[in-house]
Amino acid sequence: MLKIAPPALLDHYLGISRLLAGQLDFRSAIKAVGVEVSHIVPHDHLDVCIMMVNGLYHTAYETGLDTFWGQTAPAPVASSPIRTLLWGEMDFLLTSDAQQETRYHCDTPFTRPIFEHNLRSRIHVPLKVGGEVIGALSCSSHQVDFYSSQDVENAQSIADLLSPYFFALRAAEQAKQSAIIEAEARAREEGLRLGALNLTEALESERQRIGMDLHDQTLADLTRLSRRLDRMMQEKDLSGEMLEPVARSLQQCMQNLREIIEEAKPAVLQLFGFAHAVENHLDRAVRDQGAVLSWRLIDETDGAIDLVDQTVRIALFRITQEAINNAVRHAHAASLDVRLRASGTAVIIEVTDDGRGLTRGARGEGGGIDNMMTRARLISAKFTIGANREGEGTTVRVQLPLPAQTMKSRGDEA
């Protein structure tokens, strides 16, 4: 690498300005100007690190060599060997042999490229806009004691040329990220709004169903029994033989009413816990449908679900209930497994069948699945549905993060 006298550098500075035009991201910008920069400050490796707006993290973009620096996600400035420069405590850093410099012997992965790629002489100068340090320009050579104070001045001139453009790129990137976050937040809000609306409609339909059940079944039975008792009283025929069928009808009416109430508010869930309520529903769903299938409930949660808020627990039960109903009524399955487990800081519910899988309209996609998804969103749970691991049948999976206080309660109980 040959150094060129300063009078010959003007064309290269102008070349850097021309090459920056039209570059829309940091990586392409630094790669575009690498050759022109080498005519001013020769290097084997060139990189810029850009500080994020909060000043706590920075990201490196490089050319010449592909190193660990350019492959990492945003990293803490406090872990960088050149943090004093980024914090504005130093005007520049000039190192004759980085492999002998103590700052690069600290226990951090950010010093690895120095030794992995045999980087020796190094220059670091700040990128400044309006007196604020927004990053640093770094040049490295394989040769020892290669750079001089003149190279530092030239590197600072290049940095001053790059700084406004990189500042604009950082502002554009920040605006882009803010727009993405805002759009995602709006999408989530709109999804929750529509989901809550759909769920409200579903709940209204459920209330109407319960009302019709009470009217068409319970109220009709009670009306019939009342009229029968009126006739018996008018005929003064209140013998035990005549009252026995009335008593049986009353018992049946009470049983029907209990089933309607249980469907509306699962008492088993409140009294005996989540796993028992799911087992009870599994048994009843299979029996009521007259389905011929084997089922299993595998509970590995150690009671974790019963520690969450009651509203959340009921929502989880309704999702599990709907998944079981879909499998029993529509899947034509031979077996059905419900697995409850705790994993790290979450509880996971999986309902798996070996039936015919998801077919359009066959599994209540217009209502049941949408309601499960909405219930999951409203309690901040992750919901997925698809083919099971064997590629046949269907698996419904719900993953609910557990609050820290719930995990602490489990630990205290243990």
Image: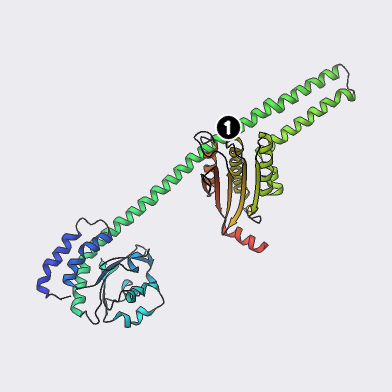
Q: Which residue is drawn at 56% across and 52% down?
A: 400
As drawn, the residue found furthest toward the right would be: 239
Q: Horizontal placement of 208 versus 79: left or right?
A: right
Q: Quick check: 337 above or below 220?
A: below
Q: Quick check: 374 above or below 92?
A: above
Which residue is label 1 attached to? 205
Does the image show residue 80? Answer: no
Residue 3 vs residue 1, the one in the foreground: 1
Across and down, in percent, residue 153 comes to 19, 75
Across and down, in percent, residue 58 comes to 35, 66
Q: Horizontal placement of 124 versus 404: left or right?
A: left
Query: In the picture, which quadrant includes the N terminus?
Result: bottom left
Q: Quick check: 29 above or below 221?
A: below
Q: Horizontal placement of 76 versus 273: left or right?
A: left
As drawn, the residue found furthest toward the left would be: 7
Give the quarter of the image for residue 6: bottom left
* SS state under label 1: helix
Query: In the picture, which quadrant includes the C terminus?
Result: bottom right
Residue 276 vs residue 406, the one in the foreground: 276
Neighbours of disc 1 within 10 Å: few (<14), some (14-19), many (20+): few
Give the quarter of the image for residue 82: bottom left
Residue 118 vs residue 260, the one in the foreground: 118
Does the image show residue 155? Answer: yes
The type of residue carrying mark 1 is Ser
Q: Which residue is drawn at 66% across and 34% down?
A: 289
Residue 93 vs residue 40, the one in the foreground: 40
